[in-house]
Amino acid sequence: MKPHKLLPWVSALVPSTTARTASFHPPHRADITFSISVPSSSNPSSLLFRIQAQKSIEWIALAQGTHMANANMFLVYASQSDPSNITVSPRAAPGHVPPRYNHNARVALLSHSGIDIVTGDITAEIECFTCLKGYGGFMDPDGAETRWVWAFKEINEEDEETRLRSDDVTARIAFHDEFGRVIVDLSRARTDSSSKDLFSDPDFDAVHPVDQTGDDSNSKYDMAIAHGVLMSLAFFFLFPSFALSVPLGYPLMKIHAPLQGVTLGIALLGAVLGFKIWNSAGRNMHPHPILGLILISIILLIQPMLGYFQHVHFLRVGGKSYFAYMHRWLGRVGILLGVVNGIWGFAWVGAADRGAGWWHTAMVWYLVVAGVGLVAYVSVRGWLVLVLERKRKGVLADIQRRVDGGYRDLDEDEDEDVGEIVVR
């Protein structure tokens, strides 16, 4: 056999590098695969990626970026008009809000994409023409540490009828069940566009989860929940309740000040968690973190100082000074703004959207509790004002009676003396 006749057999045995892709599975989900590659060219102008998932996935997404916020995202879900077809929706989230359709993205859905009629498995092969030099954010095709985010929403079999099926690229999506971040070495991912299978040679060593580098992305949601619980506890219940201890007559330095100090510690812990979340998200300008920092600064520095000055004034001369009124009204306004800032916090993470799942439910309950709490505080405060005013009037009336009674006794004594003089 001539040597040149061996070449086809030899080439078939040697692994081809013309379809090398950086691939990965989400943790504990071997049934889901993301693959990323760059067309072989001296000056590539697009990115290739494939998303594979089983039928239980309602929607799935891959995005360029370090976080969901401000990421260049590509969502995949089932088509409504054709059960074997899929919809690819390029989206962008300009903050902690649900992603919106990105009109500037240019993508193409490749021929091997669709839904297997028998198994229901999803395959999306996408070429993005604006992911390297465009709206997506100028990613280096030879970058060894490019940042990517993934997410998906799963659906139960009994909820199959409510599955998202739409041809609308702006369709509303439910909040994700899982998400994560990875670092992809694009320098190891090259695909010859003439290859029949653009993703035939996955390289799982070219991808490293960010979580393995010490940044646990899932912990941010735990911190967000802890932040919300601590701040709600402080501003909904503790601050208003302990403020009411003053008109009830409890000793300021034994009851009011220590309890408010404990509450301040709780609020400060919640603020630290909030700042960590905001800092890890790139410190995006939003009313929630900005107002939060202002409020915690006022509560930590100004409020205790005003309360102390009023206490010193009371010990020296008695009564109230303008420090007391500033302390009282600054506290009331701070509590109200803290509750309002909680609403902005929910809006920041996209909870105002009905598709945000339990985040939206939590926001609704927050609003309900805020309304009930406001009515309760105003009612209790009003009742205390009436009771204290009635008590004050009673004390004044008692004093007046005693004063009047003293004068009457004096007048009777004088009459008796005068009577004795007249008789004599």
Image (spheres, helix red, strand yellow):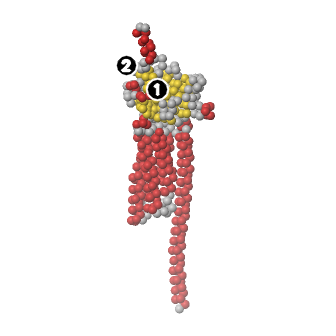
Report the front residue among 379 and 237.
237
Picture residue at 44% right of the left edge, 49% below the top: 269
Q: Amino acid at mark 2?
A: Ser
Q: Is residue 147 above or below residue 236?
A: above
* Residue at mark 1: 35
Q: Position of residue 28 (x, y in %)?
A: 50, 34
Q: Is residue 256 above or below residue 148?
A: below
Picture residue at 43% right of the left edge, 52% below the top: 265
Quarter of the image where one finds residue 305: bottom left
Label 2's element?
loop
* Residue at mark 2: 42
| Residue 172 visible in the picture | no
Picture residue at 42% right of the left edge, 46% below the top: 272
Mark found first going from the N terminus, 2 or 1: 1
Report the front residue among 402 and 187.
187
Q: Is residue 352 above or below residue 9?
A: below
